[in-house]
Image (cartoon, grey):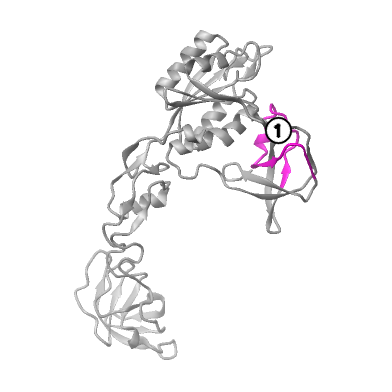
Amino acid sequence: MLDTVSISAPEKRGILDCLGHVLAEDIYAGEHIPPFDNSAMDGFAVVAEDVLGASEETPVSLAVVESIAAGYAPAKRIERGQAARIMTGAMMPAGADAVVMQEVTQFDGEQVRLAEAVEKAENVRFTGESVRSGDLVMGSGKLLRPQECSMLASLNRSEVKVHRRPRVAVVSTGDELTPLGNALEPGKIRDSNRYGICAQLREAGCIPIDMGIARDDEEETERIFRDGLNRADALITSGGVSVGEHDVVKSVLSKLGEINFWRVAMKPGKPQAYGIADGKPIFGLPGNPVSSLVVFELFVRPALLKMAGHSNPFRPTFRAVLDEDIVNKDKRTNYMRSIIARREGRYCAKTTGPQGSGILYSLVLANGFIVIPPGVSLKSGDEVEAQFLGDGVG
C-alpha cells in the first residue's frame, strides 16, 4: 500500500496556518538566536572577579552605573568595581561577564550590596546559544507543533512550504443504516462507522469529506463514489466488501480502478479492499464497527500519513506482559483490544473482554492492541507485541 501512495504536493502556508502539517523544505537559520549576549534573569551585571567570595557574612558593594531594560542597548562599559542593573533578556553591557540575581542583593539607588558569588558566564545567555546562523534547524519531514511554529517566528520565517493535508471522502454503505436522529426501525442499525472514521481522519491530521450513506443500489453507489474521488485525494468506504449477495461495493470499486486485494489474514478486519483509481487510493473497510476502526488504524492511517509527508507513519510497538491466558485457534493474526498499563517497570496488558467485531464498547475500553499470532496458546506472564491507540489514555 505504501509503495502505491504518493506524497502530497507542497504548498506555502503562514506559520499560524501550518500547525500539524509536515515541512516540505529544510529550514536554515539566517541569524543567531539569541542575537546578542543577554541576562537570564533580573539582577546586576558584574565582573565575576569582583564578587569572588561574596556571601551574606561578607557582602561586596559595587557602584551601579546604569539600568538596562529589555529592548534597549547598554550605554556604558562595566569596569572593575562597577555593576549595571539589568532585566531578564536585556543586552549584557561590555565588560560584564556574569549576572547576580536580584534576590541576593540590596540596592539603594547608587550602590548594590551583593551577598552571593557568581562564576564567569553564570546567568548569561550567549549569542547563538540556541542556534547559529547557517545551522539546519528543521529538516523536511518534520511535523510542525507549537514549538516549531515559535521557532519559525524566531527565525523570521512568516511562511514555509508544507505538505498539503489529504482530503478524504468517507461513505457508509448499506440499506440497513439509519441516520442519526431518525427512529430505528426493525432490522436497521445506526450509522456509526462514518463518524468514527471521520474522527480518526481528523486525529491523523487529514480533512474528512462526509459523503453520507450510499444505499445498496449500484448506480447510486457508483455516483457517490465517483463524486467523492472528484472532491478528495482518497476515498474510504465502509461496508459491502464481504461476500454478501447484496454487496454492490465490490462491483463498483472494480469499475473505478484496480483493486489490489480483498482480504487480509487478520482478526478483526479480514474483509477489506485496497485499490487505486485515477492515481488516488481507495480503502474499502468492513462494515462491523470494530473491524472498520481497527483496519483504519493499522492500514489506512499509515498510508494517509505518508501522503501528508510523514517520514515514519507507524505508531511505535513494544513488548507487553500478558495478565491472562490467551488461545488463538484461528489461522489469522488477532489484534485484541486491550488495557495496557506500566507496572514495575514494564508494560502489562489485559483484554477488554469479549472481542466480537460488533462489540464497539470493547474498543471504547481499550487504550491499545496486543498482537496474537495465529495458532498459539499463551499463558499469563508471556510477552506479546503491543501498541497504543493515540496517546494511550484509556
Rendered location of residue 212, percent (x, y): 51, 19
Comparing 10 with 67, the one in front is 10
Q: Which residue bears the numbered disc 1? A: 332
Classify 10 Å Cα crowding around label 1: few (below 14), some (14-19), many (20 and above).
some
Q: Residue shown at 57%/32% (left/top)?
A: 296
Question: Residue 16: which quarter of the image?
Answer: top left
Rendered location of residue 369, percent (x, y): 66, 41
Comparing 139 with 30, the one in front is 139
Name the side, left or right, on which 82 lies relative to 140.
Answer: left
Q: Which residues are magenta?
A: 349-378
Name the side, left or right, on which 199 lies relative to 114.
Answer: right
**In the image, residue 359 lies in the stretch drawn in magenta:** yes
Give the residue at the far left of this rendering. Answer: 75
Comparing 175 with 105, the one in front is 175
Instruction: Count the labels in the image.
Output: 1
Name the side, left or right, on which 158 lies relative to 362.
Answer: left
**In the image, residue 366 lies in the stretch drawn in magenta:** yes
Is label 1 in a helix, a strand or a loop? loop
- The image shows residue 342, relative to residue 209, as above or below, that is below
